[in-house]
Amino acid sequence: MLKFLTCLTTQHDLRLVLIAGLVCLAGCFTTFRLYSRMRGARGVVRAAWLLLTGLVAGSSVWATHFIAMVAFTPGLKTGYSPTGTLLSLMIAVLFMGGGFAVASAQRSTTNDFAGGVLLGLGVAAMHYMGMSAFVTQGHLVWEHATVGLSAILGVSGATAALVLAGQARSARGQAIGGGLLCLGIVALHFTGMSAITIVPDASVAVPDQLLSGGMLTLAVGSITSMIILGGLGAVAIESQTSRSALERIRRLANAAYEGLVVVQSGRINDANAAFCDLVGAELSELVGRPLLGAILTFDESGPNREGVRREGKLRPIAGGREIPVEVFSRLMDDGARVETSGLTVLAVRDLRERRAAEEKIRYLAEHDGLTGLPNRNSLQTRLAAAIERVEASGESLSVICVDLDHFKEANDQHGHVAGDAILVEAARRLQLTVQAPSFAARLGGDEFIVVQIAGGDQPGAAAELAGALIERLSAPAPYAGQELALGASLGVSLYPDDGRTAEALMANADMALYRAKESGRGVYRFFKREMDDSIRERRNLARDLRQGIADGELIVHYQPLARATDGEVCGFEALARWKHPTRGMIPPLEFIPVAEENGLIGALGEWVLRRACADAASWEKPLRIAVNLSPIQLHNPALPSLVHEVLISTGLSPSRLELEITESALFKDYQRALDNLRRLKALGVRIAMDDFGTGFSSLSTLQSFPFDKIKIDKSFVENIHRHDRATVIVRAVLGLGRSLEIPVVAEGVETEEQILFLRGENCTELQGYAIGRPAPVDALAAWTMATAGAPARQPAETRRAVKRSA
Ligand code: C2E
Ligand code: CA
Ligand code: CA
């Protein structure tokens, strides 16, 4: 040690020693910075960094050595052989590169150690190779133990440097590594120097062409500085570019709407702003925390394959509701960087909004917008589920069809807003009465369904609930300061007696409801098998009729009306006929009521009117055509304009059209009916009172409107001479017609006796099988042609029948 210090202080120029030390320190520090870059890279980039590391390390060791040698002043002339000097540089670079390559080949202390040993040996080899290039006027005598010690010091320093610096990621690691390596180099050098004793020998010549100290210092110093600076520059540029790239990526990540989180070995490594917002924490709080299981859980476990979308829940750090999320994960790997290997990026998308929207859509799809009750769609599924439930548990189930009474009237009288208020109120009362698991649903219009589940023994339970529902629903509903009449009719079907499926139970409850309405409303009825057939029959007929009207299955037959005096046909009555494809002819007395009940009469009546007017317009003789009007048609305010339009489009003169109405048609809404009649009459159309005698037959009816004709119902005509009462009535009506100056037609005239009687009583016209049966339009030619050359069979017979009676 003493010798080492003596050597250093007495034989060295201390200023140059200081420079050597500084060059060494700078070189070693730079070396470790480069080394850290090299460890973070792969492939060619890694090789380039390794080359640069070796170059900087080697040249630093070498420069340190030579500057220190120049600082060495043994007091003799000295020089350096160029070959040895160059060789020592190559050795330094090779060993340094090799040492760092070994150390970084694998991440283990053994590698660091082996690499360190190689570095140390490299420093020693360089030093002693450099010493062999040293020429002075004398002989060098080596103290071998000290030489060994110097090598040990060098190897120790280098090994410690690599082991302690590890991957040299941080500046601190780089400083430690650089410092220790520098210490090892310096220690080796000066210990090595103290191992020499120079025995002066004047015979040893120092050739002049050898490199001199001053030149060497300058050359070595500047070249090494440049190399070191180059290395530092490279590191600086590289870290700057990667920093700004990282910054760009971070900005991009923060701008992302999705949460992005980087995970390494299960722990959070980094996250963007959106992710921090989602979990409600600062990035600094998140880094290092485990992600899966703690913050993020997946709905179903399974292989976490890359790029596969998975759904899960995110638990906010501060607690609170879990957030449903969708997660895509991807392994992050840019190929050239070790830092990014083993990192997984997870894109985390907040599903709350989507879920809320889905929820809303589902709600809207399953509920009635007005009352909030389950709608028809969800009723089907709910009822099916309820049936499944009671099937398994053996509990009871009933389906109650609820139809509000007087709803249409209230809607018509007070408007839709009032109608809506009634529906909402009714729904509220249903829900108040029905207890879970039973429920109420709205079918549409004013129809509701109550499904009673596990209510107790049937039919008692259903009867009790139905009674309660009627009571609740019959209290008037308050609306805008007034009270609207409310009430309900109910039909009940029971599981399993009345059906085992939702469809059957609902259809049968509906059937029972129909009966309840028929028996005067405000009551409930249980389904009975017998109801089934008659109602189903009517339903089917309605369905077929709707189709039949569209398919042109309806036709019109015409029945002649003849003048009573001479039997001359003066007009026809249009009578609708329905040729059903499977059931054959269906009489109007069967299908007209069905059409009226099912809202089909408007279309049917319009069609008959149009057909009849068109046919009549094509006849050569301007005979009258009578068309029957249903009460419903008569109450339609659009009737006069329809008739007007039909007359115009068919070209029929209004005076030829006669509309037949029954007395009862007038009574429903007397004023409106009269209004319509007046407007029709104003068109020039004639109005006949049909079926006179069957209704109220009050004189006031005849006085209130100037009818153009009275038709005595056939039930009286057929009883002439059979019942005195009928004969009296026919006589009275004929007398009434005479006094009011209204022509009278007798319907259903079948016999000569009847004709005689009616003519004797001054009846105006006759209609009936005795005159002619209703027939299709193409059978009328003999009556409708202007020149009846050879009279056809039927009209001839007609005339004969009338004349015989004359
Ligand atoms: P209505 O207006 O009283 O028609 C006369 C009915 O008596 C017709 O029956 C006709 O065929 C029948 N009839 C005619 N002469 C005789 C006879 O000598 N003896 C007997 N026993 N019956 C006779 P139809 O065609 O079955 O019509 C029945 C009812 O259907 C009609 O009674 C009418 O109220 C209604 N109707 C027919 N077509 C239409 C239509 O286009 N519109 C409307 N609204 N109702 C129609
Ligand atoms: Ca008629
Ligand atoms: Ca009639």
Image (spheres, rainbow, N blue to C red):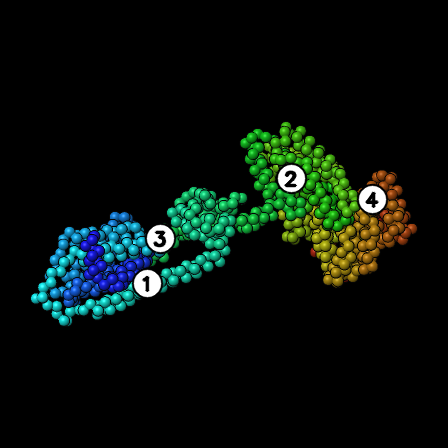
Q: In terms of secondary structure, where does tag 2 sit?
A: strand
Seen in the image, is 514 located left or right of residue 803? left
Q: CA distance from mark 2 to mark 3?
A: 61 Å
Q: 201 and 70: which one is in front?
A: 201
The residue identified by callout 4 is 695
Queried on whether the Cβ of the residue with tag 3 lies below 8 angstroms from ligand 1, the answer reads no
The residue identified by callout 2 is 440
Seen in the image, is 388 located left or right of residue 726? left
The residue identified by callout 1 is 232
Q: In terms of secondary structure, where does tag 4 sit?
A: loop
Q: CA distance from mark 4 to mark 2?
A: 44 Å
Queried on whether the Cβ of the residue with tag 4 lies below 8 angstroms from ligand 3, the answer reads no
Does any portion of residue 772 appear in the rendered image?
no
Question: Can you tell which of label 2 and label 3 is closer to the viewer?
Answer: 3
Q: CA distance from mark 4 to mark 3?
A: 99 Å
Q: In terms of secondary structure, where does tag 3 sit?
A: loop
Question: Can you tell which of label 1 and label 4 is closer to the viewer?
Answer: 1
Q: Residue at x 60, y 38 (%)?
A: 504
Q: Residue at x 28, y 50 (%)?
A: 163
Q: In terms of secondary structure, where does tag 1 sit?
A: helix
The residue identified by callout 3 is 341
Type of the residue with mark 1:
Leu
Q: Position of residue 756 (x, y in %)?
A: 85, 47
Type of the residue with mark 2:
Ala
Type of the residue with mark 4:
Gly
The tag earlier along the polypeptide, 1 or 3, is 1
The tag earlier along the polypeptide, 2 or 1, is 1
Type of the residue with mark 3:
Ser
